[in-house]
Image (cartoon, rainbow, N blue to C red):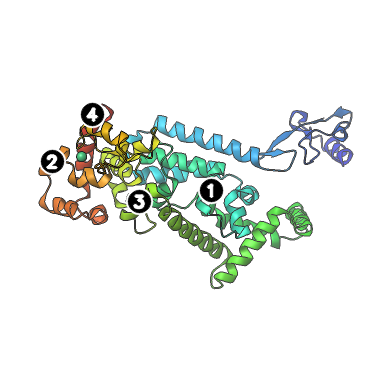
Amino acid sequence: MLDCLNIYAEQWELSVNLGKTNVMVFNKSSRILNCAYGFKLGTQELFPVRNYCYLGIKISLNGTFKQAIEDLRKKALRAFFSIRRTVNTRALTTSTMLKLVDSLIKPVATYGCPIWLHSTNIMKTFVAANDCASLPKTSTGDALETTHLRILKWILGIHRKANNNFCYGDTGRLPWTISVVPQCVEYFLRASTCDAIGVNTLLHCTFQEQKNLQLSWYKTWYESIDKCTRTFPSLTPAAATLKHLSSTFIEHWSSELKSQSKMRFYCSVKTEFKEEPYLQLPKRSSRINIAKLRSSSHDLWIERGRYLKHSTSDALRACRYCCEPDQLEGLLHLPHSEPPILESEEHVLTECPGYHPIRAKLSDNLLSLLLLKEYGTIMVSCHLPEFGRYLTHCFNLRNPKRTPDS
Ligand SMILES: [Zn+2]
């Protein structure tokens, strides 16, 4: 075949770029085998390589796309950092930032996904239909999703260890893996129907090979489409697969949240998987502080106490304003004493006397909603901007040195 290519090139006076021509003999061990040496184009020897970048996708000797996905992850992060350098992101609302990310970063991270998406954990879990495995949990093992979550956390202004389910829930966004499934299904259907003649010959032969050997790419998409079109027969294959995957994801998201004790406050204010109105607030400090409060990724002792020594003791999570240091010391050593007043979200928002002066300035309506502990109502009411300012004051009073900018 190489001789044929050489003769053809010579006849038409074409030159083959030998710097970009290499030999790959695929094998499971990822090693360059002896049989990969000795290939020649005319008299010129072609050298074997471990990786080859073809049309922007790195192909590895063992046939996996791990290296390719890792490279795309790095490229996407580089693109994200360059946006942060060139655009004044502080002036943009969260929704605008999300749109920017969708149009500039996501296409980089998901480049060529119709050929590699089947190897992600989300797709494997979905096809395996394992009842014990949850889609949000398995997504954290995918490089594509860790990149997506890292970007979301930066936009929301919360730390990198903040809860992943909160990021999906409050932005109302599905994992990138799920959002690009329709284009992968369309590609599979196009490949399955192409003819053995003309420009699509190679695609047709590759598809038949995948089908005959029942390889993972073919099996994943065939089984997913089959399963989803049986569940939603009235929809097109692409729409049915997207609907099935997203409803399974949201179902798992909801049950996982309920089982996470850290997300108790979040569960009390979050009712639906959708983008929250506070992300539209013009004031950045309000948006960030509300996100911190909702995700429990703040500095209040109820959370910080979890990570200290003796974290089982409630005394470490007590409000330092309401409990004297001596009392705390006593609580640590006397296990059967009165339970301390915990510095929880509710305590700071409605009870702690340390914040009374700020609370006194609130409008009557917001104050009464706070006293009734109607936090969920506040999050969708017209008092949201005032609530954001109130929260910023509370957090600034508590941590004077670590104030976020406004
Ligand atoms: Zn207090």
Label 3 residue near ligand 1, CB within 8 Å = no
Callout in the foreground (3, 1): 3
Q: What is the quadrant of the C terminus in the image?
A: top left
- The residue drawn where x is 62% and y is 53% is 124
The disc at residue 371 is none
Residue 36 percent coordinates (x, y): 85, 34
* Helix, strand or loop at mark 2: helix
Query: How far apart are labels 2 and 3 at the CA level?
Result: 25 Å
Determine whether label 3 and label 1 are within 8 Å by CB.
Answer: no
Q: What is the quadrant of the N terminus in the image?
A: top right
Q: Earlier in the sequence, mark 3 or mark 4?
A: 3
Query: How far apart are labels 4 and 1 at the CA level?
Result: 37 Å
Residue located beneath label 3 in the image? 264
Residue located beneath label 1 in the image? 139
Query: How far apart are labels 2 and 4 at the CA level?
Result: 17 Å
* Helix, strand or loop at mark 3: helix
Q: Earlier in the sequence, mark 3 or mark 1?
A: 1
Query: How far apart are labels 3 and 4 at the CA level?
Result: 27 Å
Task: Depth check: give the residue in front, 10 or 255.
Answer: 255
Residue located beneath label 2 in the image? 356
The disc at residue 400 is 4
- The residue drawn where x is 77% and y is 38% is 29
Residue 292 percent coordinates (x, y): 32, 41
